[in-house]
């Protein structure tokens, strides 16, 4: 039985995996190489969304560590399209380049990442993130046939990005409790009534009343009854990707207000087991959309490099920024990495002097905690899986 406090690949109600595809102890949350930011990415026409997502993934420490080792390509036997091989080549090139590069391999694989994507058309960054992560997951499963769902959760991709939500329904009549679990690779949050990330998370876990046409069919009462339904994070991922839902699906309009988000996030209050030690995450990437609708505008991002400093990455441009600038953005996607030994309220300095950089070698551990997830077949319901110029110091 997997709970929020146990090391496990599975949630309650799932059988243990028959195979472990990637040893969890080999996933390292700490950067293995220390350096400044790598190259910017050239825009070939409305590809800013692609560039911004690729940069956020490039600076995801456990993923970058694995791709820099070239372990995947050395063992890969897949013919044709392999998103893991493409990302491995891309990350190695970006982090070892001085001038801006063209992400040609990713552009060539564009239609394989998502059939609905069209080059030259502005696409949604969140959609592209989800499709890219799913494509990497499929690549990790390509050499394995007829795997059970629990085993599919043991790829390196699902061990990094995957988690579980718990939906708990309580019948008002008989007080019976009904729990169900669903996987997530990111958490989409409604921000219409929220001024901060923590307020949006509070809204996310606030119980919903089921009554009237939305009654709950209680198996114990054997009738439709009023009930409450509450979502909580049951198994926390190593990397928490959050989408602040700024775009209206019907009008394409955008919620442009500023939503505050912290450098360090405690996920514990939103867990199924809310009591216990803080469950801390450290911000390492922020993807921003500027513009008035999802049909136009521009994407760029801020990422924290392995030297502990923050950089604004806007296509070819890579510029040093302070953490204060990073925290003032109109964020669309937020990326947090699981921490181990940071105290709540501790604030690491991201000043321009490297000697003042946070000790990023200590915040995140290489342990296998909270690696629960399932394969694409298990993603249902609320889950949305459907995740240049050289550096110069300046401030915005």
Image: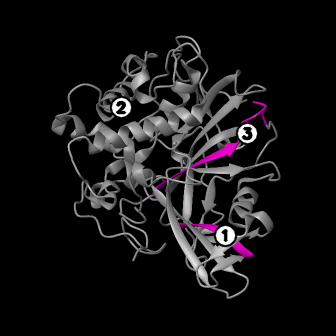
Residue contact at pointers 2 and 3, CB within 8 angstroms: no
Q: Mark 3 points at which residue?
A: 246
Q: Nearer the viewer, residue 262 or 374?
A: 374
Q: Mark 1 points at which residue?
A: 230
> How far is the residue under mark 1 from the one under mark 2?
37 Å
Above or below: residue 131 compared with residue 391: below
- The disc, 1 or 2, on the residue closer to the chain's N-terminal end is 2
Can residue 314 be seen at all in this image of the molecule? no
Q: In which quarter of the image is the N terminus?
A: bottom left
Q: In which quarter of the image is the C terminus?
A: top right
Q: Residue furthest front?
A: 223
Can residue 264 be seen at all in this image of the molecule? yes
Give percent across and percent down for residue 60: 45, 43
Q: Which of 329 and 167 is in front in this view?
A: 167
> How far is the residue under mark 3 from the one under mark 1?
23 Å
Task: Give the magenta range.
Answer: 225-254
Name which quarter of the figure residue 111 lies in. Answer: top left
- Using a 10 Å C-alpha cutoff, classify the residue at mark 1 as few (fewer than 14 neighbours), some (14 to 19) or many (20 or more): some
User: Residue 87 has which mark?
Assistant: 2
Name which quarter of the figure residue 78 lies in. Answer: top left
- The disc, 2 or 3, on the residue closer to the chain's N-terminal end is 2
How many numbered markers are drawn? 3
> How far is the residue under mark 2 from the one under mark 3?
28 Å
Dot 2 falls on a residue whose secondary structure is helix
Q: In this view, does 192 lie to the left or right of 233?
A: right
- Using a 10 Å C-alpha cutoff, classify the residue at mark 2 as few (fewer than 14 neighbours), some (14 to 19) or many (20 or more): many
Give percent across and percent down for residue 285: 56, 41
């Amino acid at each position: 039985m997997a709970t929020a406090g146990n090391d496990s690949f599975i949630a309650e109600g799932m059988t243990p995996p028959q195979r472990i595809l990637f040893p969890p102890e080999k996933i390292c949350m700490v950067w293995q190489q220390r350096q400044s930011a790598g190259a910017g990415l050239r825009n070939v026409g409305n590809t800013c969304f692609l560039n911004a997502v690729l940069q956020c993934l490039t600076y995801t420490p456990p993923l970058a560590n694995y791709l820099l080792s070239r372990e995947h390509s050395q063992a890969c036997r897949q013919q044709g399209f392999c998103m893991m091989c493409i990302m491995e080549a891309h990350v190695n090139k970006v982090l070892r380049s001085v001038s801006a590069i063209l992400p040609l391999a990713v552009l060539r694989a564009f239609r394989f990442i998502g059939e609905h994507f069209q080059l030259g058309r502005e696409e949604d960054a969140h959609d592209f993130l989800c499709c890219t992560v799913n494509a990497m997951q499929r690549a990790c499963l390509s050499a394995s046939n007829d795997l059970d769902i629990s085993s599919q959760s043991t790829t390196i991709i699902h061990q990094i990005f995957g988690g579980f939500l718990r939906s708990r329904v309580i019948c008002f009549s008989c007080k019976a409790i009904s729990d169900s679990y669903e996987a997530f690779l990111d958490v989409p949050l409604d921000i219409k009534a929220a001024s901060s990330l923590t307020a949006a998370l509070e809204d996310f876990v606030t119980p919903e009343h089921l009554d009237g046409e939305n009654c709950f069919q209680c198996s114990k009462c054997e009738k439709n009854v009023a009930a409450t339904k509450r979502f909580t994070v049951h198994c926390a991922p190593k990397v928490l990707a959050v989408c602040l839902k700024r775009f209206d699906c019907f009008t394409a309009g955008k919620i442009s207000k500023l939503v505050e988000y912290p450098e360090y996030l405690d996920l514990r209050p939103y867990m199924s087991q809310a009591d216990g030690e803080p469950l801390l995450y450290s911000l390492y990437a922020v993807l921003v959309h500027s513009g008035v609708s999802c049909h136009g505008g521009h994407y760029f991002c801020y990422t924290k490099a392995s030297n502990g400093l923050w950089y604004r990455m806007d296509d070819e441009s890579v510029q040093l920024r302070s953490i204060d600038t990073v925290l003032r953005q109109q964020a669309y996607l937020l990326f947090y990495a699981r921490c181990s030994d940071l105290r709540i309220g501790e604030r690491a300095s991201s000043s321009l002097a490297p000697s003042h950089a946070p000790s990023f070698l200590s915040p995140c551990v290489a342990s296998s905690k909270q690696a629960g997830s399932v394969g694409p077949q298990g993603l249902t319901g609320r889950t949305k899986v459907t995740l240049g110029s050289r550096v110069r110091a300046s401030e915005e």
